[in-house]
Amino acid sequence: MAALALTAAPARGDEPPCSETVPVTGEAQDVAQLRAQLRRGPLAAKVTDTCHYARVALVREGDDWNVTLRLGDSHVQRQVSSVSASAAWVESWLLPALANPPPGLAAETRANDESTPPTTSGRSAPPGTAAASSAANQAEATAASGDTLPPARIALLSTLALGSDRSWWAGGELGGQLPLSRMVWLGAGIGGAWDPAFGGSSAVGDHISRRLFRASGRLGLDWQVARRTYLTTGVGVGVLAADVLRSSTDESASADHGAVFAELIGQVGVGIIGNLALVGGLGLRARTPTQRPAAPSEDQEGEQTGEFEPGPPLPDPSPWLMGEARLGAEYRFGGGP
């Protein structure tokens, strides 16, 4: 009989730790991230039946999370800024409660709790909760400045630029940022712009238009200036290709060039709903010198009639310096909130 009893009762070393057994409710992505954080903390070394009776509810509210912890007839609640901070707070609250469980915690409590969702009505917290709540503040600050990376970002922006030759360019950009640390990011951007009427139409009816396409790699810094507001600065190096076209009723001429450019960007993002943010800022871009178009190329009609007479020299396909205003939307995904 003794041998049978030993066989029927599993060794405590074979039981899963509290990081696996404490029930957690919430969105699947948030629950998975919280569970992963708990596996790296002190609860991963705790094996006790009391963890089965605890309840953790994680509810996302805008850019924040509402975390509720319940053990028996007692519970506490807190609003935090990230899932990482939620994990730190769960640990700092639950560890003292495991050492000194609330009185009257029986096996039937677990069955009752499984059919009753966590509530937010006021009840007394378990012994040791006040001290744990104080420790939670420090744990939350530690988590916020820890190793968890912020989300990656992808942005779609409209741009309006003024060139050094007093031309106006309308365009757009698709860009992305990948965090390397809490502040440093690596990114890239591709974009284009169009100067629909360089200097307007001339007296003889010629019309000049220009376009450019660019791609760059970037490195920059992020600063969290408020709960839903952040400042982004960066520098970049890239390449561009531009062309200029002059057309009239008789003939047309064109030229193009390629160049390397350097850029500076600065923008502010404000969270508006969920992972979506409104972003706006300024950019400055300077390209390397290029050779000015020597002579326009003839179109096929001018070649066939032999009556082509070169007009005035074409302007550079793109100005050497451009300052732009940027406005658009940005979506954040992955990483720590």
Image (cartoon, rainbow, N blue to C red):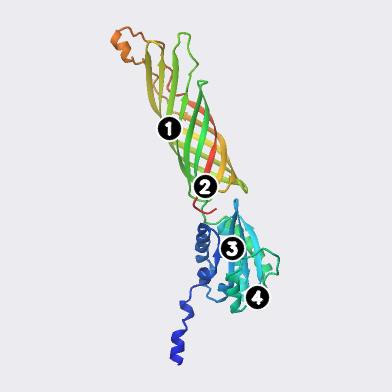
Depth check, front residue: 25 or 279? 25
Taking 30 as reference, is 80 left or right?
right
**Residue that numbered label 3 is attached to:** 57
**Residue that numbered label 1 is attached to:** 214
Query: Tag 2: Cα neighbours inside 10 Å, few (<14), some, or many (≥20)?
Result: some
Sequence-earlier tag: 1 or 4: 4
**SS for tag 3?**
strand
**Residue that numbered label 4 is attached to:** 102
Q: CA distance from mark 3 to mark 2?
A: 24 Å
**Residue that numbered label 2 is attached to:** 332
Q: Amino acid at mark 2?
A: Arg
Query: Tag 3: Cα neighbours inside 10 Å, few (<14), some, or many (≥20)?
Result: many
Q: Amino acid at mark 4?
A: Pro
Q: Amino acid at mark 1?
A: Arg
Q: Estimate the x, y position of residue 18 in percent, counting from the top left.
A: 53, 71
Q: Amino acid at mark 3?
A: Ala
Q: Estimate the x, y position of residue 249 in percent, counting from the top left.
A: 40, 11
**SS for tag 2?**
strand
From the viewer's perspective, is residue 288 above or below residue 118? Answer: above
Mark 3 or mark 2, whichever is nearer to me = 3
